[in-house]
Every structure is written in structure tokens, then in C-alpha cells.
Image: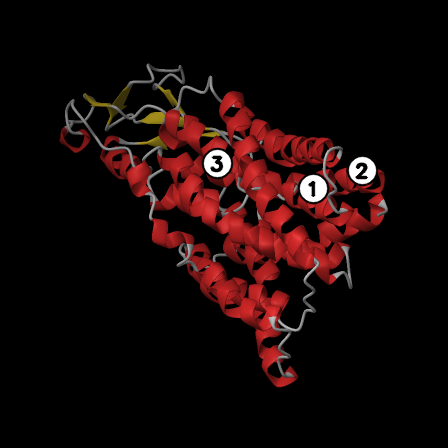
Amino acid sequence: MAFLQTFVNVVMIVVLAVPGYLLRKTKLFPDKAASILAVLLLYISQPFLMMSSLFNKEFRASMLVNFAWVLFFAVALQLIVYFAAKLLFCKEKNEAARRACVASSYLGNVGFMGIPVMQMLFPGNDEMVLYTVVYNIAFNAMTWTLGVFAITGDKKRINPLKIVLNPPTIAVIVALPFFFLNVHIPEQVMTPIGYLGNMTLPLSMIILGVRLADMHFVGGRQKIFAEEVKAFSEDYGRPLAGGAAPDSAKDGEPAVVTEISDIAAGAEVLDKEGQTALPTCLSVSSAAGTFLRRRGILDDVRVYMVAFAKLILSPLLGLAVMLLLRLAVPIDRYVIIALFIIGAMPTASSALNFAEMFGGDKETAAAATLMNTLLCIVTIPVLMLLCDLI
């Protein structure tokens, strides 16, 4: 497929984030808008997209072999990229940030963006969409197992029931009998299902725009006072421990709060003179205040490392594995192309959602998700040039 055509298609997708960005910047969307829209996306639009992708599609027994290959590679390639990401970020000292980076490096936006991208890049090719749906089955199972473990590092947080009891997988289970039996769904039923399913891509991009509006592109300093430290630390899940309580300090006297290092995913703590203070001790004066320097999306090296892992390493490593295996066993060309493109999808919002749910580094996860989605405008069209060589 021509570079320019693919580039325009991907730009059209990312541009859908603009309304969410503008509505949030103009305060027409409240603070919780992204979370509310995410519920609509997860419980309504994505399940209906999965069903509409299976309904009224022709099933042939010969497809089963290709479906089996997709399921196999869906698990194998995610595991390969997961361990590669662990090596890539092994020197990261901030454990929460390291876990967020690893999860963001292999969890791809297969459900919200993968199916619409396949429909756009391969119009009329139902098999490419079906491969993406099958991939989603394995992806959702691994998201609620390996994905949760990647963020938390705690096996006890894994709920096996979530492997099946999640909206997209339930939708697939409902739709599969109709697909395998080639049952025709009346147009009167398909129309509302299609409308709801088609909301998935624009809705996911609007949520991205809302989150983008709340992020800082470049780092900056934020002045805070002693009475604000407690609330600030609680916002980022950093409990206060030891030292004098900040709200008990008198004017001009410092209140020391320990164990608030690495605030806001790598923020530097500055003293009143603007010099970097000790990372394990935050000295706050209720009169003069202190400064926090936050990293922005564009000046965090870890975000670029995640982008390299997800947008370049993941698809190329997967392609190399599949081409090597094809030397020994026959694998359909379109299966390889579909998996190659799926591997090139940007980071899924699952990484951010799990970071929020389980107290992980949501700042790093959010920055990685946003940066990957922006950079995929270039990486996906470039990688698509390789499809002619497969």
C-alpha cells in the first residue's frame, strides 16, 4: 500500500482526537469526562464493534488453520516483546515507572484502533478484520493476566474470571455461534449494532484528546505551599510518612515530609533558590513555598524508549519471528501482514487504566500512550511499505 495513502488514513484517525482536546481545554468537558467516556467505550461501543465484525461474515472451515496461527502468535509475540521490554527498562530505578513502561511497550491498541485501521487499510477484505477479532480474544485474556501483573508485580491481583468476564470477550462469545453457523442477521438488527460499534474509534480518539489536554508537553515548575503538599502527594498515591506534618508548620519554618520521592513520575524537587534538593526529603516552607519541576511528554526519555519498543521493535521483532517460522511451516501471507500491522498499533489505554486501578505510575502510562498515538502517524505508513516484501 502506498505510503501517502496510509499516512492520510492514519492522520484521519488521529485527527479525531481534536474535538476532545478542544472541549477539555475550553472546560466544556469536566474533570471526569475521560473516565465517563471510557465506560461507554468499554461496555457499549467496543462490544458492539466486536459483534458487528463477526455478524454476517462468511465462515469457511479452511479459516480455522489461520485462526489457530493468529491465536498462537498473539500469545507468543506479546510474550517476546514483554521480555524484550523488561530488558530494555531493566536499569530504570523507579519501579512503578519501570512497570508502566514495560506494560506500555507490549499492550497494543488492538480493540479500539486495530479493527477500524484494518477496515480502512484493507476495505472489503473481511478476513483481515476477522484475524484482528481473533487476536483480540487472546489479547484480552493476556491483558487481564500478564497486563495486570506487569503493572502491579503481584500475582494475587490477577482475577482469572476477568479473562472471560470482560465486555469485548463476552461479545465475541455471543457472536461466534452465529459466525460459525453462517446465520444471517437481519439488516434491521445490524443497523443499530453497526451504529454503536462505529462509535469505538471516534470515541477512543476523543478520550485521547481529553487526556492530551490535561498533559504537559514540556516540563515546568510548579510552586506549592506546605498546606498543599499533603493533597498533592495523595493525588499521586504517595503516602506521607515521618517528619513533621506540613500543615503544622509555622510561617517561615520548614516542614519536612519524607518518602515523597519521584513525585509525578520523575518530578525533581527544587528548593526556594531553584536548586535541586535531596530526592528523599521535601523541605517545605509555608511562607516562601518550594517548587516542583515536572517532566513533560516531550522531555521524558522513557516515553521515547516506550515508543521505540512499541512502534518499531514490536512489529519488526514479530515479523522476523514469523518469517523465520515460515521457512519451516506454511503460514498464510495475510496472517503475517495482519499480525505485523497489529504489532505496530500504539499503546492501548489498558496500560493507563490498570495504572489508575492498581495505583501504578499513571503519569508515565498516560504520557507513553499519548506519545505513541501521535508518533504512529509516521511509523505505521513507513512499516506498511514492508508489506509488499512479505
Q: Residue at x 58, y 65 (%)?
A: 49
Say which label, 2 or 1, has the lower sequence index.
1
Crowd tier of the residue under label 2, counting other residues whose Cα lies within 10 Å: few below 14, some 14–19, many 20 or above: some
Residue type, mark 2 in image: Leu
Residue type, mark 1 in image: Phe
Q: How is the image coloured?
A: secondary structure
Say which label, 2 or 3, has the lower sequence index.
3
Quarter of the picture containing the C terminus is top right
| Residue 16 picture quarter | bottom right
Q: How far separated are the C-alphas under marks 1 and 3?
A: 19 Å
The picture places residue 65, in percent across and down from the top left corner, at 66, 52
Disc assigned to residue 386? 2
* Residue nearer the viewer, 330 or 21: 330
Say which label, 1 or 3, has the lower sequence index.
3
Q: Is residue 194 above or below residue 70?
A: below
Q: Is residue 386 visible?
A: yes
Does dot 1 land on a helix, a strand or a loop? helix
Residue 113 left/right relative to 232:
right
Residue 183 left/right relative to 381:
left
The picture places residue 291, in percent across and down from the top left corner, at 37, 26
The residue that mark 3 highlights is 103
Q: Residue at x 73, y 39 (%)?
A: 378
The residue that mark 1 highlights is 340
